[in-house]
Image (cartoon, rainbow, N blue to C red):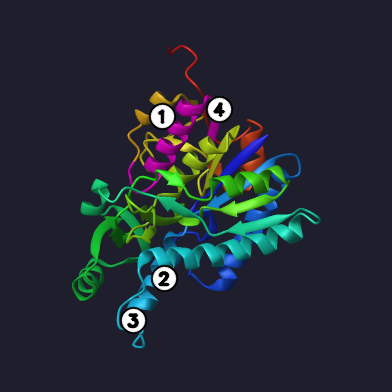
Amino acid sequence: MRIVVALGGNALLHRGERPDADVQQANIDRAATALAALAHDNELVVTHGNGPQIGLLAVESAADPALSAPYPLHLLGAQTQGMIGSLLACTMHDALPGRRIATLVTHTMVRADDPAFERPTKFVGQVYPKDVAKSLARARGWHIAQDTGGWRRVVPSPVPERIVETDTIHDLLNGGTLVVCAGGGGVPVTADRDTGALTGVEAVIDKDLTAALLAEDLKADFLLILTDVPNVYEGYGTPEQRPVLDATPDELRRGGFPDGSMGPKAEAAARFVERTGGLAAIGALDAAYEIVHGTSGTLIRPDLTSG
């Protein structure tokens, strides 16, 4: 079975944890253990989030006196792909002796006229108290918005249209290689209408939507979205909270999940199932094997009564 796995940023760096290298290495060790069980009997493509990491690099870049201007987000995104991809590749190499593993810096095409560029919504970086966030926004020209536990920077998040390296990923998979790619949704680029030349843009693409597009293009059987909760929940954080064990795409969308947390994951899973007739699931990192085998997580399945 061909499985595309999307590792959430909170699965790699838990809420409230310091973004130190050894902390991330410990979390990636857990991820490798969970994924190795799946990789023995399946073709695997692994994508990952980068929100905390790109936010950290952006703060460092903005504060670096050696720079005349901060590095743009698309280059910082490429840096996070290399860093997290290297950690994953080395750890997976140890967990799967003899398996070929490749990390690929991946570019994702977006439209230059995407409305997202006028309405930043994607959270990046750490959580700040409101007064600190407002001060940083004034000093650095940031847009900010309220998130769980405080305020964070928000940046444009255009819709992914095409992954530039899909054919290369396909060739690697067919050769038996486990591929780590499309980290952070891929480096966002636009193409010149006349020449096709690629240009990086100031944005961060939602990694779950990119994972769904990649899974569709690779003709994957299963899209597995891993995060830090065991299920999708209706009424999350309220006395009426209850787990959603399975749902059709329409049923999942009716849940009205928030954009800053479960919303993009639910939409990505729904899109993949609708467009391919395959299966998707959302659940906890440590239960990856159990989710694929139907004993954990939230399964998103085709609506067999429609059409």
How far apart in space, not on screen, are marks 2 and 1 (Cα)? 33 Å
Front in this rendered view, residue 114 or 197: 197
Quarter that holds the C terminus = top left
- Judged by depth in the image, the label closer to the viewer, 1 or 3, is 3
**Residue 267 part of the magenta-drawn span:** yes
Ranked by sequence position, the earlier of labels 2 and 3 is: 2
Residue behind mark 1: 252
Q: Position of residue 61 (x, y in %)?
A: 37, 77
Q: Position of residue 165 (x, y in %)?
A: 53, 50
| Crowd around label 2: few <14 · some 14–19 · many ≥20 (10 Å) | some
Residue behind mark 3: 63
Residue behind mark 4: 278
Element under disc 4: loop
Front in this rendered view, residue 292 or 277: 277
Q: Quadrant of residue 137?
A: bottom left
**Residue 274 part of the magenta-drawn span:** yes
Q: Tags 4 and 1 in contact by the CB under 8 Å rule?
A: no
- Judged by depth in the image, the label closer to the viewer, 2 or 1, is 2
**What type is the residue that disc 1 sits on?**
Leu
Element under disc 3: helix
Residue behind mark 2: 56
**What type is the residue that disc 2 sits on?**
Leu
Q: Which residues are magenta?
A: 258-281
Q: Tags 4 and 2 in contact by the CB under 8 Å rule?
A: no
**What type is the residue that disc 4 sits on?**
Gly
